[in-house]
Amino acid sequence: MTSTILWTIAILAGLGFLLALVLYLIAERFKVVEDPRIDEVEKVMPGANCGGCGFAGCRAFADSAVKAPNLDGHYCPVGGSEVMKKVADILGFAVEEKAPQVAVLRCNGTCAARPTVNYYDGVKSCKVKAALYSGDTACPFGCLGCGDCVEACQFGALHMDPETGLPVVDEEKCTACGACVKACPKALLELRNKGPRGMREFVACRNTDKGPVAKKACANACIGCGICVKTCTHEAITMENNIAYIDFAKCKLCRECEAMCPTGAIHGVNFPKPLDKAALKERIAKRKEESHE
């Protein structure tokens, strides 16, 4: 009886040792050795996991950056150039510094400028609303006002203005992650360079209808008149599909286009002084006179 028990214990022990050895060999054969630099890169990341970099999260970004031959195509909008320099130092790469960006709303269809023509009584979602019809106003290109962009922002950089019915971007909190851009079914939010001291010019409209139609739908709409294109001496403004667009890389912030826009569709922000339309128009007129002499 005793010998049977001993033999049983010995067999079980031997079997256990054999199985452990097999498992060890299998683990060694198929083990994945992870580069320790992945952990180092992840530690310097902001940990927002917002997806603004194009990867599933900071860990996925770190894994890709470590395996890549360089940092081309890798940029963390939340951490910006400061974080990217740290990543470059860890990996021994060079990184090009990028200008900080911020989200801007390319719509100025306020409640006052864009009267309501019908009433939506459904799920409070811009995505759902856009799938059903063009919106509560006569402008099919404007903000739907349900706040999908606000919900998408993880940094509290957006809120809805009850007076205008439009979202407002807090540029101090905005990380340019692009979540709001992806959330807007009307493509009204755009990432643009912050500009020197935060100053920038942009066209706050996406209405591609012809002038009279656009103006009837919204008093603040771009009417495609082309005055801004003719005014700009830096070739920073183009007109396509009846809508003007300002290239922030070429814009010199002279504000002449803003002064000449008949509907106020061009917006200048964070300038130290209010727009002096009279002075700018006088300067433009004088320049034209000199060019004809």
Image: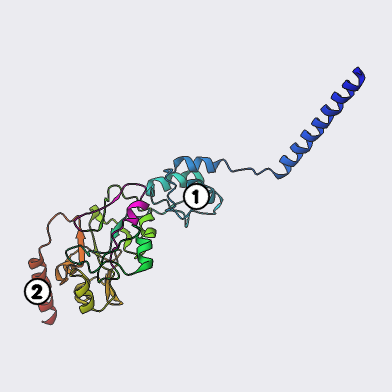
| Residue stretch rendered in magenta on the structure | 142-164
Q: Which residue is mark 2?
A: 286
Q: Which residue is mark 1?
A: 61
- Judge from the rendering whether residue 111 lies leftward or rightward of residue 135; answer left or right: left
Q: CA distance from mark 1 to mark 2?
A: 54 Å
Q: Is residue 183 magenta?
A: no
Q: Residue 177: where, in percent of width, then height? A: 38, 53
**Outermost bottom residue:** 292
Label 1's element? helix
Seen from the viewer's position, the closer of residues 150 and 250 is 150
Seen from the viewer's position, the closer of residues 222 and 85 is 222
- Judge from the rendering whether residue 46 lies leftward or rightward of residue 221; answer left or right: right
Seen from the viewer's position, the closer of residues 262 and 69 is 262
Vertical arrangement, residue 12 with respect to residue 118, above or below: above
Residue drawn at 30 percent across, 49 percent down: 157
Vertical arrangement, residue 228 with respect to residue 19, above or below: below
Quadrant including the N terminus: top right
Vertical arrangement, residue 6 with respect to residue 21, above or below: above
Residue drawn at 34 percent across, 55 percent down: 149
Q: Amino acid at mark 2?
A: Lys
- Judge from the rendering whether residue 207 lies leftward or rightward of residue 262; answer left or right: right
Mark 1 surroundings within 10 Å by alpha-carbon count, few (fewer than 14), some (14 through 19), many (20 or more)? many
Q: Which mark is residue 240?
A: none
